[in-house]
Amino acid sequence: MAYAASQDPVTGLPRFAAQEDYLREAMTEALGRGSRVALFYLDIDRFHSVNETMGHSVGDQALRLIAERLRSQVAGFGRLSRLAGDEFIVVVAYRPGEFNPLAFAEQLRRRMEAPLAVLPYSLYFTCTIGIAEFPDNATTPTDLLNCAEIAMARAKRRGRNTVEVFNNEHAAELRDRMALGGRLRDAIIGNELVLYFQPQVNAQNGRIVGLEALVRWQTPDLGLLPPSRFIRVAEELGLVVQLGRWVLDAACRQLRAWLDAGHDDVLVSVNISMQQMLRPTFIEEVREALRASGVPARMLEIELTENAIGESETRLLETVTELKALGVQLALDDFGVGYSSLSHLKQFPIDKLKIDRSFIVDVSTESDGAALARAVIALGHQLGMAVVAQGVETEAQLGFLRRNHCDLFQGFLFGAPVDARDAGRLLRHRYLLPGAFASTRPDRTLLLVDDEENVLRALLRLFRRDGYRVLTASSVDEAYDLLARNHVQVILSDQRMPQVSGTEFLGRVKELYPDTVRLVLSGYTDLATVTDAINRGAIYRFLTKPWNDDELREHIREAFRTHAAAHRPET
């Protein structure tokens, strides 16, 4: 019984609990000699997928081989033990100048990348390592372990297969965990949490079309705490699911209040953790939140992170597919800084792609940043997604992103997150920074040609909301005159007009103004004429009446994007 309590039966390694006395003695000796003790917290990346796909027998064999590999690397340096699951601890006592903890951790990490032969498989693993040192970071074995675990967790968040050394920033995180951890559960139950909202605005005119819900903790003694102070604490204590459920319910209740105030064309986006989204009850929780509040599903948007797509892909795909079936909108947050593949991105029914703020900082000053932002915008549009730029803070960024057809903006240029009362005031005014949008208006001129005045008026109303400079002509002669006096990028023409057909008119326009993008909108379809016009390059696209407003607006947006791409200067 004593042996079973102190030794791990799978790997044959000592359990860490049985090594704490050794660690305590090493720390005491180091204090007397002026030496140091380094603790390495090693976690095997995504080991759970082996147990899930190949079975626990293969997983146990892999753990034994990993333990042997680590034992050979640690021999002569320190003590190796198994903490739990796929987590191992290495303790090394050393004199300054005789041992480099960071170099040793990198050696362990690189050694872990070599394949493991677990017949009939060849398995490939990586590991993430956190390092903490006595006496710099902690004075007790438990605190030293906590410090190394926090460093490891931060390394995981940076992308895995890396090494992180505990530092002062981590120390603040540890203090928060100790100070706030015991209070957070009561705060959720005791209604100390509040939602703040940051607007998302339409790129054409600055109209608020959505708000992102961001949780804050109103503490009685520390004031209003941002999520960076307590989200990690919630994750470590297993409270993130409970916290996420509160945010979801509170967001739906606030949506109900705004809906009652007449704001039926705005949505609220909510960040959902992977732990919550992969729960078997999550879909029912969303359905119940919508039912209890009476909010249409189209007004709720759920955000998942790019890294989430790379994990538990099958289960996550099932979940988001069910969410789409409910009518909920889906957004992929912080795109560009994670490790999801494009094949993953293609499979998921995402409505919005949110560009990470790190891509936005230098778009107006650095060619590399500009190229990356343009590439992400083009990728999103090719996949049928709206693109949101996060972290927009200057009018220069706004102007660049508008010229490159980004769809939505979010950032401090339009305001910091505000409480529900101030968010309601923003919704009543609805338009933000009209001066900035006027000064950064891109040169987008649309010419509408139709001999029916009622059609022209309907199209004019439709396209003015998108911020274009719209010209109208009821005859081809009038259209030629407008083209001569204005720089027109896109033309939308009726097919049947008294003087000449739309395809003939646009064929002549191609000769006069070859850089225009030309579309026909008609209630009559002569397939041979249309085919010939397209083959000759006279028209870019043939659209039919009656039209769907949203689809027609998207066709025109795509036409302007096509024009911009064809005339973009080389960088």
Image (tube, rainbow, N blue to C red):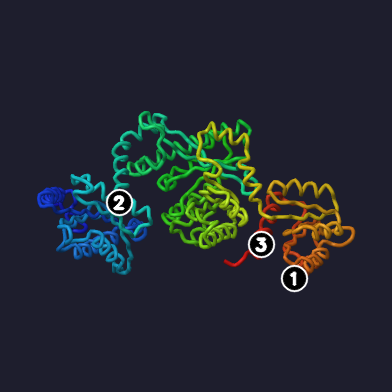
Label 2 or label 1, whichever comes before in sequence order: 2
Q: Is residue 5 visible?
A: no
User: How many C-alpha atoms fall within 10 Å of the one at disc 3: few (<14), some, or many (≥20)?
Assistant: some
Which residue sits furthest bottom? 536
In the rendered view, tell whether residue 551 sits above or below residue 194.
below
Q: Which mark is residue 167?
A: none
List x then y, in percent, for residue 536.
76, 71
In screen coordinates, is 342 left or right of 403? left
Label 1 or label 3, whichever comes before in sequence order: 1
Q: Which residue is mark 2?
A: 151
The C terminus appears in which quarter of the rendering?
A: bottom right
**Label 3 element class:** helix
Disc 1 versus disc 3: nearer the observer: 3
In the rendered view, tell whether residue 273 sits above or below residue 381.
above
Q: CA distance from mark 2 to mark 3?
A: 47 Å
**Label 2 element class:** helix
Q: Which residue is mark 3?
A: 562
Q: Residue at x 29, y 67 (%)?
A: 116
Which amino acid is tagged 3? Thr
Query: Which sits in the foreground, 535 or 480?
Result: 480
Which amino acid is tagged 1? Asn
List x then y, in percent, for residue 291.
54, 35
Q: Quadrant of residue 401?
A: bottom right
Q: Which residue is mark 1?
A: 535
